[in-house]
Image (cartoon, rainbow, N blue to C red):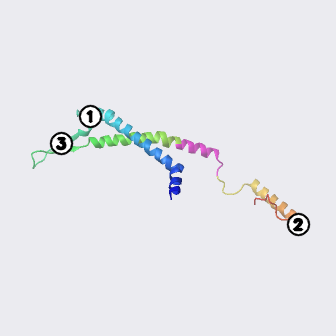
């Protein structure tokens, strides 16, 4: 049972996934700090607020003395985080992967639905030679190098 667990953990996929999680969490901390400390402060300065978390709109209440505040600063910060993460993933993962796939596709021959005339002619010649060999030597086994 422990050997199966060891094999599972030492598989390349699990180790790669663990590394990706660690790097992802470190990257999340960087993006959060960037959006909170840089972009959040810029947005707070634009709206004359102390922090982006306190950005909101006061809505007066008809029945109560104190109104309600709709805070949208945290949503703005979350959108900024998402845009930064999406942009980095797109430019550092998706674009290079698409380029690699395009280069790989250029190196491959296109799929052909039916064999070309040359291939058909060569197959016909092979079959004729096989028939001639079988007629000349009826007891010989088939050619071991035959791949048809």
Secondary structure found at label 1: helix
Label ID, residue 58: 3
Q: Which mark is residue 136?
A: none
Asked if marks 2 and 1 touch (Cβ < 8 Å), the reply is no
- As measured in the structure, the alpha-carbon distance from the residue carrying label 3 to the one carrying label 1 is 16 Å
Kindly give the residue lying farthest to the front in the view shown. Answer: 2
Numbered disc 2: secondary structure: helix
Residue 81 place in picture, x, y as percent: 36, 41
Q: Residue at x 26, y 31 (%)?
A: 45
Q: Which residue is mark 1?
A: 44
Q: Position of residue 99 (x, y in %)?
A: 55, 41
Image mark for residue 135? 2
Q: Position of residue 138 (x, y in %)?
A: 88, 68
Q: Which residues are magenta?
A: 97-110
Above or below for 62 versus 137 = above
Q: Earlier in the sequence, mark 3 or mark 1?
A: 1
Examine the residues drawn in magenta and state their main secondary structure: helix
Q: Residue at left 46%, top 42%?
A: 90
3D distance between C-alphas at marks 2 and 1: 93 Å
């Amino acid at each position: 049972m422990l050997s199966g667990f060891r094999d599972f953990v030492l598989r390349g996929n699990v180790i790669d996934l663990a590394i990706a999680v660690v790097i992802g969490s470190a990257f999340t901390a960087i993006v959060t700090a960037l959006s909170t400390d840089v972009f959040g402060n810029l947005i707070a300065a634009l709206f004359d607020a102390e922090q982006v978390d306190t950005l909101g709109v006061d809505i007066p209440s008809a029945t109560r003395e104190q109104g309600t505040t709709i805070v949208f600063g945290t949503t703005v910060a979350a959108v900024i985080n998402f845009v930064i993460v999406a942009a980095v993933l797109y430019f550092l993962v998706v674009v290079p992967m698409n380029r690699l796939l395009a280069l790989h596709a250029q190196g491959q021959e296109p799929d052909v639905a039916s064999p070309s005339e040359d291939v058909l002619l060569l197959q016909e010649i092979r079959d004729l030679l096989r028939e001639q060999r079988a007629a000349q030597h009826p007891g010989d086994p088939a050619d071991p190098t035959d791949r048809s």
